């Protein structure tokens, strides 16, 4: 056996490593260059082709999956096994079937992670709010595309986006999807790349469409007026912090506080947690609460269990006797992820470059992208119509002498010469001659040719119209706005996440107990308030009032309720009915402005009495706008006496009204016109200071001055005062509906 040769390899410095090159040669290479040559391409691939979404709102894996389903015909028809979809997607996405199926699960309706799921699923797809609820294997579940995917693939076959080769150059796939709405902000999207990440929260589809349309019409539009805050699938509460929201909207970064919703079941003495922040899971919350109980930090809980079922998420917490549920929840919000933060990082690929953009900038980028899609679609349609027109123009020339065309074909010796002879005989080009030569013998009659050519004039008009669209950016924008409105109307849903203000997010430590008994509240035009017991009211019902004053509100409730007094300075003052002393009809009562310490010159104009904060507040403004706000927007967990921004101060308040459910209301303008409106036609706004929506058109110099509840029989012909669309002028009262008669009926 030959002796082993002594190694000639020298020790390498720390900054280099050995690379075998050829037959045993060792070459020194700096580590920095090795990392640059090998790691940087990997990092760029992860950033550009895997983890960061693009302006259409999708990562490559999402786009490949959805496009495969689209090509499989799953936009219509019945569902197919998920395994079939996964297998077909591997032609575009050469990663394991498990990774593809995981992607599909997260896009599905069953998983409940998206406000508007893209995959209509059947079977067990797990739940986003559960860590341990695993989804079934792909061979058991079925899926198809959800109806909203029509808006992702609309006109994709009209050259609206570029197509590129797949990984083995055997197929084409779209580089982007021509989304008709800003899907990048509608559904949540999270990705971790190399050296950067993306975390985009979801927004309400209807609000996003309205905001985008408004931004197209006015580049200086205040997006907060139409897009108050994000909207999360779980329906958790958003603790509104104006500074944080402004930061997210302007920079694309910020941390939004989310809080679980819960309900207290008095009969069972338990708390039911019905929604949780989308950043946590049921198991994490339950484990943390159990840990707190074991450590002795929480002593008020006797049992906790996960009762999530067919009706959705539910965590039940059994309480020990005498436990205050609100105080317990305040403690749990502090120590568990029942209150959590969503860290926004709006990092999106724009033209292959990762950019962190604010909401407005992101919408502007999407608008630019959509304008290009519409222009490309229009140019495609124009080209197709121009090609058809060109063929018909050639056919029109044949119409002049059909016999000549037949003669040319019959007298041509060789088939290859038919087209050139037709070109010479009629002065048409090769494309037109080919079209004519392919016409069947049965179609060589005047009637057929006239039918084919009668569309020439229409085609010329349509091409001129398409040319006009291509030349006018304003017309392109109008098309986009119309499409956004149609999508908002078709797919829009009410907000799931309720906005609560930061100053209302702290729970009261002590809850005062008050005697509860029936009483009647009276509120006068001059701002006086009386609380009278039924017995006292029966003994004397003649109300003492100041000269010129009158009672405008009478409410029967109990002493243990909240009173809300809305002022003429866009503020609301809150008090307990128990704060006011019992009085008699013969007394003037309490002057509310003085009793509640209102600002100088401020007066109370409307009163609401409530125990559960259910119902709706309507605010009518002199400019003809109405704001519809849930009364729960004024609910606070602290004993705050004053809330600012109770309603919009952009226009003078004409009337405030509380209704327990949607109903018909009558609007009266100073011009004498009246409009009958059902409040169900008005969108419910969650922001207290919303300017509302235009309902009544007003002529110059006139204002809206009164809103009243419509009573059956008030008008002989109520349809006279109704309208199909809003805003509307309303109608002048007919001779049968005089103002005196209306007032007497009211």
Image (tube, grey):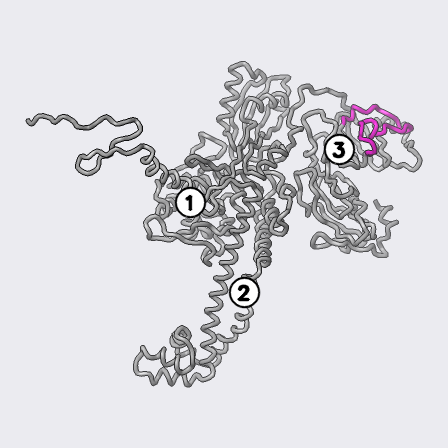
Which mark, residue 588?
Answer: none
Give the image location of residue 408, x and y in percent: 37, 84
Residue receiving disc 2 = 467
Please count the marks in the image.
Answer: 3
Give the image location of residue 90, x and y in percent: 35, 45
Residue 243 located within the stretch drawn in magenta: no
Secondary element type, mark 3: strand
Callout 3: 10 Å neighbours few (<14), some, many (20+)? Answer: many
Name the main secondary structure of what is drawn in magenta: loop
Q: Residue at x 78, y 48 (%)?
A: 667
Which mark, residue 60?
Answer: 1
Q: Which residues are magenta?
A: 575-603
**Which sits earlier in the primary sequence, circle 1 or circle 3?**
1
Residue 439 visible from this viewpoint? no
Residue receiving disc 3 = 572
Residue 179 visible from this viewpoint? yes
């Amino acid at each position: 056996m030959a002796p082993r040769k002594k190694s000639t390899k020298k020790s390498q410095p720390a900054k280099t490593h050995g690379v075998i090159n050829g037959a045993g040669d060792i070459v020194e290479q700096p580590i920095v260059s090795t990392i640059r040559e090998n790691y940087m391409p990997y990092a760029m691939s992860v950033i550009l082709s895997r983890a960061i979404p693009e302006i259409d709102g999708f990562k490559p894996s999402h786009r490949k999956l959805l496009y495969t389903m689209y090509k499989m015909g799953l936009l219509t028809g019945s569902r197919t096994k998920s395994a079939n979809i996964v297998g077909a997607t591997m032609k575009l996405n050469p990663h394991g079937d498990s990774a593809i199926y995981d992607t599909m699960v997260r896009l599905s309706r069953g998983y409940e992670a998206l406000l508007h799921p893209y995959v209509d699923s059947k079977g067990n797809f797990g739940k986003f709010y559960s860590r341990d609820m695993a989804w079934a294997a792909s061979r058991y579940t079925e899926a198809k595309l959800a109806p909203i995917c029509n808006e992702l693939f609309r006109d994709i076959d009209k050259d609206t986006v570029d197509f590129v080769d797949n990984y083995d150059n055997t197929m084409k796939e779209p580089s982007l999807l021509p989304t008709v709405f800003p899907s990048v902000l509608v559904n949540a999207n999270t990705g971790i790349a190399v050296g950067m990440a993306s975390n985009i929260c979801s927004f309400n589809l209807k609000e996003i469409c309205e905001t985008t349309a408004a931004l197209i019409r006015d580049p200086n539009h205040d997006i907060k007026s139409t897009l108050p805050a994000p909207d999360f699938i779980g329906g958790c509460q958003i603790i509104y912090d104006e500074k944080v929201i402004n930061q997210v909207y302007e920079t694309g970064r910020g941390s939004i506080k989310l809080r679980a919703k819960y309900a207290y079941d008095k009969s069972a003495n338990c708390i039911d947690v019905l929604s949780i922040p989308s950043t946590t899971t049921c198991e994490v919350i339950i484990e943390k609460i159990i840990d707190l109980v074991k450590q002795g930090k929480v002593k008020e809980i006797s049992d906790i269990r996960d009762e999530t079922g067919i009706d959705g998420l539910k965590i039940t917490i059994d309480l020990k006797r005498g436990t205050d549920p609100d105080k317990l929840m305040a403690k749990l919000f502090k120590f568990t992820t029942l209150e959590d933060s969503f860290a926004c990082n709006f990092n999106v690929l724009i033209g292959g470059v990762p950019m962190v953009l604010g909401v407005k900038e992101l919408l502007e980028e999407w608008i630019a992208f959509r304008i290009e899609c519409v222009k490309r679609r229009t140019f495609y349609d124009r080209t197709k119509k121009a090609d058809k027109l060109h063929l018909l123009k050639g056919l029109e020339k044949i119409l002049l002498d059909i016999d000549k065309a037949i003669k040319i074909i019959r007298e041509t010796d060789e088939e290859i010469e038919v087209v050139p002879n037709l070109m010479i005989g009629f002065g048409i080009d090769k494309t037109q001659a080919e079209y004519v030569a392919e016409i069947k013998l049965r179609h060589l009659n005047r009637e057929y040719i006239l039918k084919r050519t009668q569309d020439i004039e229409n085609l010329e008009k349509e091409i001129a119209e398409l040319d006009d669209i291509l030349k006018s950016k304003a017309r392109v924008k109008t098309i986009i706005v119309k499409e956004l409105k149609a999508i908002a109307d078709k797919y829009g849903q009410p907000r799931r996440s309720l906005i609560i203000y930061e100053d209302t997010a702290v729970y009261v430590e002590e809850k005062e107990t008050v005697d509860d008994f029936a009483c009647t509240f009276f509120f006068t035009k001059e701002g006086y308030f009386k609380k009278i017991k039924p017995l006292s009211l029966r003994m004397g019902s003649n109300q003492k009032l100041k000269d010129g004053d009158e009672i405008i509100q009478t409410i029967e409730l109990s002493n243990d309720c909240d009173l809300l007094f809305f002022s003429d300075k866009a503020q609301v003052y809150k008090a307990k009915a128990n704060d006011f002393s019992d009085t008699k009809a013969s007394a003037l009562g309490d002057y509310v402005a003085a009793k509640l310490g209102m600002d100088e010159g401020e007066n109370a104009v409307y009163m609401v009495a409530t125990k559960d904060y259910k119902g709706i507040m309507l605010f009518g403004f002199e400019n003809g706008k109405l704001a519809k706000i849930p009364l729960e927007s004024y609910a606070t967990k602290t004993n705050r006496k004053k809330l600012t921004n109770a309603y919009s101060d952009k226009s003078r308040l004409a009337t405030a009204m509380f209704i327990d459910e949607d109903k018909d209301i009558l609007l009266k303008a100073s011009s004498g016109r009246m409009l009958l409106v059902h409040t169900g036609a008005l969108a419910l706004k969650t922001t207290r200071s919303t300017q509302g929506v235009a309902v009544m058109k007003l002529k110059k110099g006139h204002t809206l001055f009164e809103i009243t509840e419509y009573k059956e029989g008030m008008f002989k012909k109520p349809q006279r005062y109704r309208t199909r669309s809003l805003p509307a002028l309303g109608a002048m009262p007919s001779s049968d509906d005089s103002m005196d008669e209306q007032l007497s009926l009211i």
